[in-house]
Structure formats: structure tokens, C-alpha cells
Image: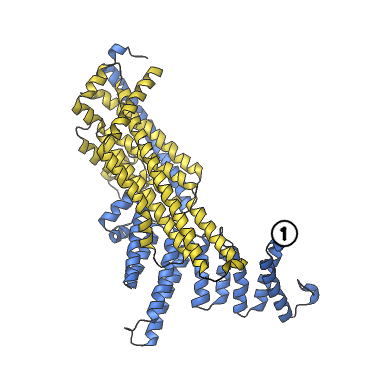
Amino acid sequence: MISSLHRIITISRNTLTEAVRQKVLNVLLIFSLVLVGSSVVVSQLATPGLDSSGLFDAQIKFVKDFGCGAIGLFGFFIALLSTAQLIPQELHNRTIYTILAKPVRRSEFLLGKFFGVVLLLALCVALMSLAFAATLYWQEMRGIQAAEAAYNQTPNWQANPFVVNAYNHDVAQIVQQVRDPQLIEAVILIFAKLVMTTGIALLISTFATSSIFTIVTTFMIYLIGHMESTAREFWLASGAGSSIWQSALVGFISLLIPDMNSFTIVDEILAGNRVPWSHALNLLGYADVYLIVLLGVSVVIFDYREI
Amino acid sequence: MEIPASQMSTCLPLSWRLRRAALVALLLGLWAPCKIVWEQRIAHEQDLLRYHGAPMTRQLRDELGQGLTIGVLSGMRSVVADLVWLNVTTAWMDQEWFRMGGYINLCTALQPRAPVFWDMGGWQLAWNASIAATQDRTQPNELRRLKASRFWLDRGLEIFKRGIENNPTYWRLWNDTAQLYQQRLKDYRTAATYYQQASEQPNAPVYLERFPAIMYGLAGDDQASYAAWRALWERLTPQEREMKQHWKEKIETNIRRLEQKLSVPKEKRVFPN
């Protein structure tokens, strides 16, 4: 058991090292950091001419949306591209034969590769989150400065306790929105979604013959996953007016494809609404169990595969 | 059962493979119904959290276009809504109010629980579009200008009220509606009720508590104004009265003035002297 774990750790470490050296992934990471940073510019374009307090509610929302959007989007590309070429690259370079000729199970090889990509994702998400936090902090500074400038237009406002109260309230609102602890919850949920995407891509790559096939199929499953809830509702309420083929199709989608749409609850957090941790943990539990199923199926398919 | 290292290579015996395949089929068979139940539970919880946010409809899809629809379907709903909002800003700069109104409706449909869209959208329509209509020289007469202005004001008011329905705890929407009643419609009594609601929401600024009393005063309802000032005074703890001198003085001055004006009997006054 321990030796098996050791082998998995070695393979995942090696996978991470290989992935970090890939130029495509580095370029994606740089683009994502630029996009997170430029969210401030987009927020200013979208909200010109508002008063300071109303302005910052909106601007902070835009920064959060684009920041988390960039983490999700580029994380998705990184997960997809790095996972899709895991096995084809090993086959192409013939390194898989050297590894499997040693006392390494196929399952260990596969899990090692998977955890390597998860480590890579964790690293990328951590970096993007740092850039996101820095952007938010900068936005907070700007917000406080702008609020102060707006109040400074009233001469001697510090002497009026009512105006001082209003200023303090505005500043507190900006700080509260920027330093929202729920943003950690949002990033964790985005990460869970990315790991699920990795699991799907890995499963497909175990029987796919090319990286392109894995990329396209995973992308399609990802899209369908966002409509799975609609298919499920239709299937559960089915019968009325649907043919047997329609029912079979939506039943297939409902039973096999993961519900990616549940993770869009992140939007609620970004809009400033409370999402209880119990709900986030429920989603994380769902993602974990789904991953175990995905990895189990991947291992079996990979065992069958002729190499 | 541990497999000997010598056998751990690329090929497993057929019986092992079949046994594993059967096990996976069994696991999938067991997982599928659990998955459905679990997902239904998650969906139910989310329905409660979101107040049943807007689903992706054909109309929404047509209005968004192909590219943005894929964005929504990829889980980028908030980013898509923000990108649509950029069109609101462009339409505002071009003073194309109907186009702007359409985009505002689209943004609020995409993210009904994002109060800033209701807040900014209502402001754009009730103030910017409405005021611009009063200065529209293409209209033949003042009456038409006033009619157009009122049209946009009503659209803005509708956005604020729908925003409140979707986000009842966002104080700024209550405050915006109150301001509209106060400053544009001169309906101080209704403004007072909205200010009252605004002041009761989380994170509302303290100064809003005084506004209902002031609005009743502007409406000429001294009795209601006195009751509101008095309620405010009674809500203040002795500690707060000590700490917020400026606050205390303001309330006290108004109560004294109204007690005098309404000839409140001395035994019923807050300040008999």
C-alpha cells in the first residue's frame, strides 16, 4: 500500500514537472494573470459617471466576475490541454513502455498522472487567486481614495458628524465587499469543477486515440453538463409527449453526465449573496464521489487498452 | 488480493478484467440513482438560495446570440451579463434609450440576484433617460417631452421594484425607489415607507433612519412625522444618546418643534420642559 502510494507520488511529481515546462501552459497562465489584472479596466469601462458608493458596488462586482471568470476559463483550458496529452504523449514518446515495464500498475500510472494534473491546477489556481486578491486590494485602495475625493468636495466635511458617519459607512461597505471571506468558497468551488473536468478528460483519454478527440469530447461533455439539470428535470417529469428515444437520450445524460451547472452557484457569491458553507461542502462531496467513479472507470478502461 | 510484481504489467488475465468490468458496471448502476437523488437535493437547495433565478429560455438565447449563449452554457453567466452591460454603457453614451432598456432587461434576466444591475439599470432609465427626454428638442412640444420623461421614469421605477422583489435585503434598491418618489414624483408619503424599509435592511447607513420622519414632515403629515421622530428617540439607548450627541440633538430639536406645533399635552411629551 505504502509502496503503491510512493509510486503514485513519484509519477505525479514527474507529471507536474513536465507540465510546468510546457510553454503552452505557461502562456495560458500569463494570459490569465493579465486578464485578472485587466478586470479593473473593464469595470471602469462598464460603470462611468456614477457616484462613488454606487460605483464601487458595481465595479467590485465586475472585478470579481472577471477575476473568477478568468480563473475558471483558463483553469479549464489548462486542465483540458494538460490532461488530454497525458497518455498520447507518453505513447508517442514511448516512455509509457519503460514505466509499465517496471513494477508499476496501470492504475498507479493513471492515478499518478491525474494527481500530477491536480497539483498543476492547484498551483495555477493559487497563482491566479493571488493575482485576483492583489487586484481586489488595488480596487479597494482606489475605492477609498475616490470616496475621500468625493467627500473632499464638501468643504470642512470632517467637522460634520453626519457626513463623517456617511463616509465611514461608504468605506466600510467597500472593505466589506472586497474582503469577503466567501470568495475563498468561490475559488474552492471553481477548483472542484476544474478537477472534475480533469477527471472527465482523463477518462476519455484512456480510450481516445488522439488529443484532439479528448479535447473536443471533454468540451462537449462540459457543455452538456451545464444543461444536465434541464435534461434531468425533463426526464424525471417525462412521459408527457416525449418519445421513447427522447426519454432514453435525456435519461442517459441524466444518469451519466455530471451536473456542472450546480457549480454556477459561484455567481451568487460574486453577486454578493450568501451561500452557506454546508451547501458548498455538499457540492464538494458530490464532486469527490463523482471523481472516484470517474477514476474507477478510467482504471478499468485503461487496463483493457492495448498499448 | 495483492498481485505479484512479476504480473503487474500491461496485461491482466481475462477473468480479472471481466470481474473488474462487472464491478464497475455494478458501481455505475448503484451510483446513477444516488447521483440523481443527490443532484435533485443540490438543485432544491439552490432554488431556495437563488429565489428561482431565470433559466435559459429560447427568448434569452435569441437575445444573447450564439457566442454569449455558449458563454452562459459554459458556466460564465456572470461574465456574459457583465459583457452585455458594456452595451448598456455604450447605448447610454449614444443616448439610444430603447436599446439601453433592452440590454438592462437582458442583464437582469441573466442575473436577477445581482442587485447592481437593478440598481444601475433603474438609475439609467429613471434618471438619465428620463431627464434626457425633458431636453429632447426633436419632440414637437413640452407636453410630448414630459410624456416621454414620465415613460422612462416609470420604466426605471419598474426596474427598481422588480429588483426589490428579487433582492429584498439590498438597502440601496429601497433607497433608490424612495429617492425617486421623493425627488421626481414628490410623493413624500410613499418615499417615507421606502426609506423606512431601506433603513431596516442589513448594512444600511444609519442616517436613513431619520428620512421617514423628514418625508412625513415634507408631506405635511406632522402627526406621522412626530410619531416617527419619537420612535427613533425611543429606539436610541442611553449609551447611544451619550455617544451620538449630534444625532441626539437633531432628533430632540425636531421632537420639541413638533410637540409645540401639535400642542401635545405636557404629560404625553418626550420633553415636557
Q: Nearer the viewer, residue A1 or B150?
A: A1
Percent position (x, y) of residue B156? 43, 70
Say if A184 sits above or below B141 in the image: above
Percent position (x, y) of residue A13? 34, 27
Q: Quadrant of residue B110?
A: bottom left
Percent position (x, y) of residue A3? 38, 17
Q: Nearer the viewer, residue B183 or A144?
A: A144
* Subunit bearing disc 1: B
Question: Which coloring applies here?
Answer: by chain
Q: Which amino acid does the dot numbered 1 rest on? A: Gln
Residue drawn at point x = 34 percent, y = 32 percent: A294
At numbered mark 1, what does the secondary structure look like: helix, strand or loop? Answer: helix
Residue drawn at point x = 26 percent, y = 20 percent: A99
Percent position (x, y) of residue B140? 33, 87
Q: Which chain is blue?
A: B
Say if A222 sits above or below A139 in the image: above
Q: Viewed as shown, does residue A146 lie left or right of B137?
A: right
Which of the image's four quarters has the C terminus of chain A? Answer: top left
In the rendered picture of this protein, how many numbered marks are placed on residues? 1
Residue drawn at point x = 38 percent, y = 83 percent: B145
> Does residue A191 show up?
yes
Q: Viewed as shown, does residue A151 lie left or right of B245?
A: left
Which of the image's four quarters has the N terminus of chain A? Answer: top left
Residue drawn at point x = 30 percent, y = 29 percent: A15
> Does residue A53 show up?
no
Residue furthest bottom as drawn: B141
Q: Nearer the viewer, residue A161 or B112?
A: A161
Q: Which chain is yellow?
A: A
Which residue in the protein does label 1 denote? B239
Say if A284 sits above or below A40 in the image: above
Q: Quadrant of residue A122?
A: top left
